[in-house]
Image (cartoon, rainbow, N blue to C red):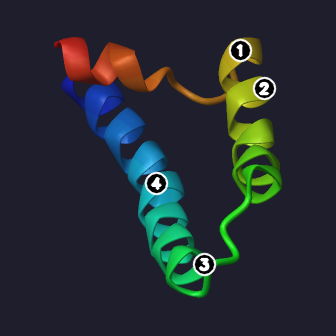
Amino acid sequence: MESERQRALAVWSVLVVPFVALAVFLWTQHDLTLGFVGAYWFAPVVLTIVGVLPAPWGALRK
């Protein structure tokens, strides 16, 4: 079970860290839009719903 938690945290860290870096950069350039946020998170949300990616809230609950 611990390896599943580590996998979920690793997968979501790989998604969240670059997003934060890009969002901060775009925000400082006054170019952060809802379209960027939606385009970035669309695939991970769909893949989580389908079950390909582990749910991040499952790893944080344990």
Mark 4 and mark 3: span between their CA atoms?
15 Å
In the image, residue 51 sits, relative to residue 6, either above or below, namely: above
C-alpha gap between disc 4 and disc 1 = 17 Å
Q: Earlier in the sequence, mark 4 or mark 2?
A: 4
Q: Which residue is mark 4?
A: 16
Regarding mark 3 in the picture, which secondary structure is present there? helix
Q: Are marks 4 and 1 in contact (CB under 8 Å)?
A: no
Looking at the picture, does residue 60 appear above or below residue 21?
above
| Residue 42, image x, y percentages | 79, 38
For label 3, the residue is: 26
> Which residue has dot 1 on it?
49
Question: Which residue corresponds to mark 2?
Answer: 46
Q: Quadrant of residue 56?
A: top left
Q: Nearer the viewer, mark 4 or mark 3?
A: 3
Q: CA distance from mark 3 to mark 1?
A: 28 Å
**What number of labels is visible?**
4
Secondary structure at numbered mark 2: helix
Q: Amino acid at mark 2?
A: Val
Q: Are the two marked residues, 1 and 2, in contact with CB atoms closer than 8 angstroms?
A: yes
Amino acid type, callout 1 = Ile
Q: Amino acid at mark 4?
A: Val
| Cβ atoms at labels 4 and 2 below 8 Å apart | no
Dot 3 alpha-carbon crowd within 10 angstroms: few under 14, some 14 to 19, many 20 or more = some
Other residues around mark 2 within 10 Å, as few (<14) / some (14–19) / many (≥20): few
Closer to the chain start, of discs 3 and 2, is: 3
Residue 39 x/y as whole percent? 82, 51
